[in-house]
Image (cartoon, rainbow, N blue to C red):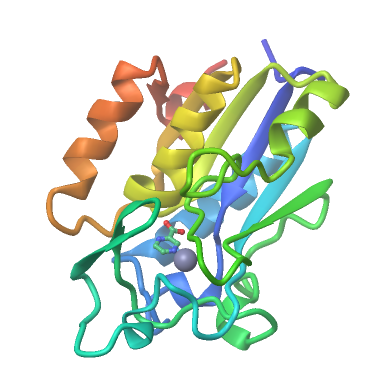
Amino acid sequence: MSFTDRDLFLAVDIQNDFLPGGALAVPRGDEVVPLINALAERFPHCGLTQDWHVGGHMSFASSHRGRAPFETVDLPYGTQVLWPDHCIQGTPGAAFAAQLEVHQAQLIVRKGYRGEIDSYSAFCEADGRTPTGLAGYMRERGFTRLYLAGLATDFCVAYSAVDARKAGFEVIVIEDACRAIDTGGSLASAWKRMTDAGVIRTTSDRLRAR
Ligand code: VGL
Ligand code: ZN
């Protein structure tokens, strides 16, 4: 069995700032890049997401006096983890990793571009109601299944996976092609939320055997 016109493979946030040496480096984040390149070749339809913040974004610790990265603050839409400045529009840190070779990607979803609101999810911003348009794009193109890999498992991958389930799609997370930030128990809680939402967990080996 191979992938069909109903399947979309989405590689999440493979950007310099999330790789070793980057502003918000995900431990061993670079290890997923060759896996993602190989996976993408097998899908007829691929997309990419790109964290795409304005300078002074509310998710940056630097926007809150006296606060440090990885602390949390309460914002109008809920609790927000504070991050180092990262993925600022047009900067080298926001660019896709040089080793990423998914030139056949048909779609790039940018998110987090509103200064007052974060967006981990590729579907919906952190207020839980402002859509990015991805669900509509998938429906118009007839995609019913979403395969996810990338960075970080416990933030952008997990929020995207759960929102995709809410939008009615089948969702498969390719675990070994993801890496986590894991701050304050975020990885365990992300897997619980994904599993509860009916997200399927697989590995690139298992997919290769299809
Ligand atoms: C992400 C934290 C802040 C991610 C993005 O891509 O998982 N995490 N912005
Ligand atoms: Zn971000």
Residue 140 lies, with reference to residue 183, above or below; the image says: above
Give the left or right position of residue 50, taking residue 6 as reference: left
Q: Position of residue 31 (x, y in %)?
A: 41, 60
Most distant residue in the top direction: 1
Residue at image x 68%, y 51%? 48
* Residue nearest the observer in this picture, 139 or 23: 139
Would you place residue 191 above or below residue 126 in this image?
A: above
Q: Residue furthest left?
A: 184
Residue at image position (86%, 25%) is 141
Q: Can the viewer see residue 67 in this picture? A: yes
Query: Total label count?
Result: 0
Residue visible at 60% across and 40% down in the picture: 123
Q: Is residue 158 above or below residue 55?
A: above
Question: What's the residue at 45%, 34% (across, down)?
Answer: 174
Which is more toward the observer, 112 or 4?
112
Relative vertical location of residue 4 with respect to residue 205 in this rendering, above or below: above
Camera-nearest residue between 12 and 74 = 74
Q: Where is residue 115 in the image (x, y as percent from the top left)?
A: 56, 72
Quadrant containing ligand 1 reads: bottom left
Q: Where is residue 43 in the image (x, y as percent from the top left)?
A: 73, 32
Quarter of the image with the C terminus is top right
Instruction: Write down the quadrant of residue 82 in the picture.
Output: bottom left
> What is the quadrant of residue 91 in the picture?
bottom right
| Quarter of the image that includes the N terminus | top right
Locate residue 94, reporting x and y percent: 60, 76
